[in-house]
C-alpha cells in the first residue's frame, strides 16, 4: 500500500465534503486501495471537524482553527468582529451560527452562510471573505444567487486582525 496526492483524489475529496454539507477539505494522504471509502472515513474519524445538522439531516464539515478568517478583527473605527469555527459575532451583538459554504478556494477566498434563525443585525445571510495577510474584506449578500453572481452587494467592510 502507498499514499498519494493527485488531482483526482482532491476532486473526490471535495465531492465527498460537498455531499456531507461542507466544502473545505485539505489534502491528506489516503491509502490508495479504496480512495472513496478512505476519504469519507477520514472525515468522520476526525469527528472534531464534523457536526450533525438536524435541520438538513446531514453531517457538516466545520472550519477548523487554521482557516485564515478565524480570530478577532477590528475595522479601525472601534468596531470588532470575532469568528470561531462555528460562530461569528459583531461587537456586542449575539453570536450567530454559520457554515462554511466555500466550494473551491485558493486559500484566500471563502464564503459563509449565517444559519442562525431570526434577525441577524449587522450581517447579511451570505458573506464572501477575501483574506490577504492580516486584512480581510467582507462583502454581504442577501441570497446565494446574488453572492455567486456578484449582484446586489450589501455591506462591505475591511477588517484587520487584532
Image (cartoon, rainbow, N blue to C red):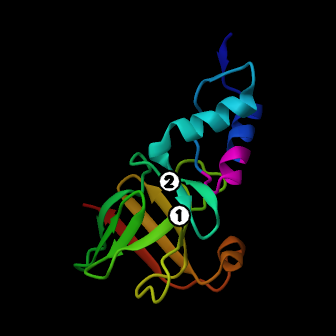
Q: Residue at x 58, y 34 (%)?
A: 42
| Image position of 159 with respect to 154: above or below | above
| Image position of 5 with respect to 2: above or below | below
Judged from this view, the residue extending furthest toward the top is: 1
Which part of the image, by quadrant, shows the N terminus? top right
Q: Which residues are magenta?
A: 15-23
12 in magenta: no
Is residue 26 in view? no
Q: Secondary structure at mark 2?
A: loop
Q: Residue at x 57, y 40 (%)?
A: 44
Position of 70 with respect to 145 (left or right) is left
Mark identifier at residue 2: none
Residue 138 x, y percent position in the rendering: 47, 71
Residues under labels 2 and 1: Cα distance?
Answer: 7 Å
Question: What is the total number of numbered labels drawn onto the structure image?
Answer: 2
Position of 105 with respect to 49 (left or right) is right
Judged from this view, the residue extending furthest toward the left is: 78
In the picture of the structure, the residue carrying the numbered disc 1 is: 99
Residue 125 x, y percent position in the rendering: 54, 79
22 in magenta: yes
| Badge 2 vs badge 1, beta-carbon distance below 8 Å | yes
Q: Residue at x 60, y 61 (%)?
A: 101
In the picture of the structure, the residue carrying the numbered disc 2 is: 62
Amino acid at each position: 500500500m502507498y499514499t498519494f496526492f493527485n488531482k483526482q483524489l482532491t476532486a473526490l475529496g471535495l465531492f465527498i465534503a460537498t455531499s456531507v454539507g461542507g466544502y473545505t477539505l485539505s489534502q491528506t494522504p489516503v491509502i490508495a486501495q479504496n480512495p472513496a471509502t478512505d476519504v469519507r472515513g477520514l472525515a468522520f474519524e476526525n469527528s472534531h471537524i464534523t457536526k450533525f445538522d438536524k435541520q438538513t439531516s446531514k453531517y457538516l464539515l466545520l472550519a477548523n482553527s487554521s482557516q485564515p478568517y478565524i480570530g478577532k478583527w477590528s475595522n479601525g473605527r472601534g468596531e470588532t468582529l470575532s469568528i470561531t469555527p462555528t460562530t461569528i459575532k459583531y461587537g456586542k451583538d449575539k453570536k450567530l451560527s454559520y457554515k462554511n459554504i466555500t466550494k473551491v478556494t485558493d486559500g484566500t477566498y471563502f464564503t459563509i452562510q449565517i444559519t442562525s434563525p431570526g434577525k441577524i443585525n449587522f450581517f447579511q445571510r451570505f458573506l464572501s471573505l477575501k483574506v490577504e495577510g492580516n486584512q480581510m474584506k467582507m462583502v454581504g449578500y442577501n441570497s446565494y444567487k446574488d453572492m455567486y453572481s456578484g449582484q446586489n452587494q450589501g455591506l462591505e467592510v475591511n477588517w484587520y486582525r487584532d
